Amino acid sequence: MSIIPEKYAGPALAVVATAIALVIVRKKWGSRNLPYPPGPKGHPIIGNLFDFPENPICEGFARIAKEYDTDILHLDVMGSHLVVLSNSDVATDILERRSVIYADRPRMPMVNELMGCSWSFSLMPYGNTWRIHRKLFHRFFNVSVADQFDDKIHKAVNVFLHRLSESPERFLKHAHFLTGSLTLSVAYGLNVESESDKFYSASEDAMSAVDIALVSGAFLVGALPILKYVPEWFPGAGFKRFARIAKDNLDHSANLPFQHVKESLQAGAMTASSFAATCLEELPELSKGGVDEEAIRGTASAIKSFFLAATLHPEVVRLAQQELDQVFGGVRLPDLSDKPQLPYISAVVKEVLRWRPPTPFASGSVHRLTEDDTYKGLFIPAGATIMDNTWATFRNESAYPDAHAFKPDRFLKDGQIDPEVKDPERLLFGWGRRICPGRHFVLRLLFLTVARTLATFDISKCLDGDGNPIVPDGKTLLELFRNPSQPLPFKSDIKLRSTHALSLIEGY
């Protein structure tokens, strides 16, 4: 029996129908009577949950965007809005020119709230604390003082070359150690000599946990934050135990080196400059902020991709070595100051970053919109997560013809870098107020590593038992929110070019 009198049933049903229609219209058109950006239609309640692409997700988003002929893709995942950008011009318009309302970070229940990473500068929400950190980072890493770490970079790269000459088959491990040890040197002034170093191992354990937690879908609490209140003993609450252990590791990895720096400063024994020392002297209450580890660690992925490209493309190695030999004649190794004389090496670096971007979603590209916005007749609601799909940008055939091929020459014109070609070094490091502050440092490190490696080593394909070349498949691990992306393990034949090359390495 209806609880509504019969004479009112018709009008009541009309009101309900109108209300439902208004909800549908609002869902489709937003609060300003404008449509959301194009995207799959979705289903009630769950929205586009089943439309979310599988790995590699950056490729999946690019495929969906192409299907809907849009550079601004919209998905609604259980009421949460996700907008994925696939064009650098659009990203510039939205994330750069409107950065004040796009500078926030989305809520990350697992990483920030359960694992306690909200102190991390790259994950920190936009606000006064973030601005203080940003100011300090800018002073420490801006382009005008980028050369202050050149001695550290030169030393770290030379250690890398020594390790490579001793065990070339471990080149992937050496690349990882290069960036991990250099991070600790810049951040804390620590001299790390092996993987067994307590500071290095603590940092690796902590960052491995963060890598896992940042993989989209790894933990359901990311989609349902209320689950963070579930007790650890509850069935299915394994994520709480993971978070507790990870938090202990993260606290240990942050507090251990900071305590070392603090005690060294108090004892007057701190001789190496570091970001931590500056923090402790000027902003002791914020000293846990750390350097932008994601950016520096991402360099390891780029170095691994360089080895992959060199293994697959011997002609690139040959041309690069010709340039190096013409400029230096084997007298010395290239320095950072030699970059203007090495346009082909610069082009190789740019193509490595474009071909296999270490951050397929631009560094720091996970933004949160803090107020409603419109763009070219489209409505983007407050609270939406905005992402820049750099991988898709770098596969744009109009900007980069034959985009899937590795071609450093695409960045050259008349033997010099062509300024008309969109520069991956600019597009890769994010936008607006969230642009990576360590980008100048990272690019200097990558350039020197590539230049000195090619100057001293030959890189080619390994041979199987029958003498046939083993061709790497070139596969890369690409996952949403997981930066850096990693080339899957592959074999490469790496040999010193000559005994003279070894003497050059030992001379530094």
Image (cartoon, grey):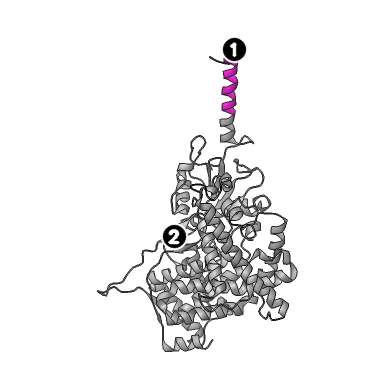
Q: Residue 124, position in %: x, y?
A: 64, 57
Q: Name the secondary structure under disc 2.
A: strand
Extreme residue in the right direction: 282
Q: Residues within 10 Å of mark 1 (few under 14, many from 20)?
A: few
Could you tell whether 447 is left or right of 273 in the image?
left
Q: How many marks?
A: 2
Task: Give the label, 2 or 1, closer to the camera.
Answer: 1
Is residue 57 found inside the magenta-colored segment of the image?
Answer: no
| The C terminus lies in quadrant | bottom right
Compared to residue 216, the image places residue 313 above or below, namely: below
Kindly identify the amino acid type of the residue bearing the numbered disc 2.
Answer: Leu
Position in image of residue 381 (x %, y %): 62, 42
Query: Which numbered disc, 2 or 1, marks the residue that appears first in the sequence?
Result: 1
- Say what secondary structure mark 1 lies in: loop
Residue that numbered label 2 is attached to:
477
Q: Which region shows up in magenta?
A: 3-22
Report how far apart the C-alphas of labels 2 and 1 lie in the structure.
62 Å
Residue of label 1: 5
